[in-house]
Amino acid sequence: MSAGILMYRRGSNEVEVLLVHPGGPLWRKRGVGSWQMPKGLIEPGEDASTAARREIAEELGLPLIGGLHRLGRLKQAGGKVVEAFALEQQVDIDAIRSNRFEIEWPPRSGTMQSFPEIDEARWFGLSRASRSMLVSQRPILDWLADYLRNGEDPRSSKDEHG
């Protein structure tokens, strides 16, 4: 199971969400339909909100301020279950510093190469985010829109770290 955080900010015209593009050669030429909410595996003994915060720190190299709001849980097309949280926070995408991973590349070459886990992050308006995001993560955008439409203050629904 994985956990992630859909960060958002209120723009002058619409709400914007921070989406990331996975790094590495398998994602290099994929554009529309490949952007995602930053997320990662929940470690044994770790709760979902702690894992989501850790993953943001690893993938984006940024501190998080404030409490998380649980949006829901979904199963992605590949079968991975993802617990999604929301957090309103302004993020300077130029300050993002992703961790790296190593894989054998090209396959069966015996050569190990290092790639950033996230090669790009961007702010997207909700309508554009829907077109750019992985199809199986798109319901998270609807959950955020519903959450914001209900007029709740995100700071009023804090997790144990808020």
Image (tube, grey):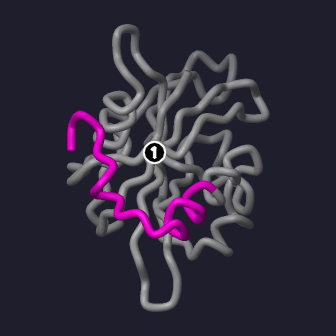
* Residue sitting farthest toward the bottom: 12
Regarding mark 1 in the picture, which secondary structure is present there?
A: strand
Q: Is residue 11 above or below residue 133?
A: below
Q: Nearer the viewer, residue 107 or 66?
A: 66
Q: Nearer the viewer, residue 121 or 63?
A: 63
The residue shown at (47%, 40%) is 4
In the image, is 10 to the left or to the right of 61? right
The residue shown at (57%, 76%) is 125
Q: Position of residue 25 (x, y in %)?
A: 63, 41
Q: Position of residue 116 (x, y in %)?
A: 43, 42
Q: Specify the quadrant of the image occupied by residue 80.
A: top right
Residue 160 sits inside the magenta stretch = yes
The residue shown at (60%, 54%) is 143
Q: Position of residue 65 (x, y in %)?
A: 21, 54
Magenta segment boundaries in residue numbering: 143-162
Q: Residue under circle 1?
A: 85
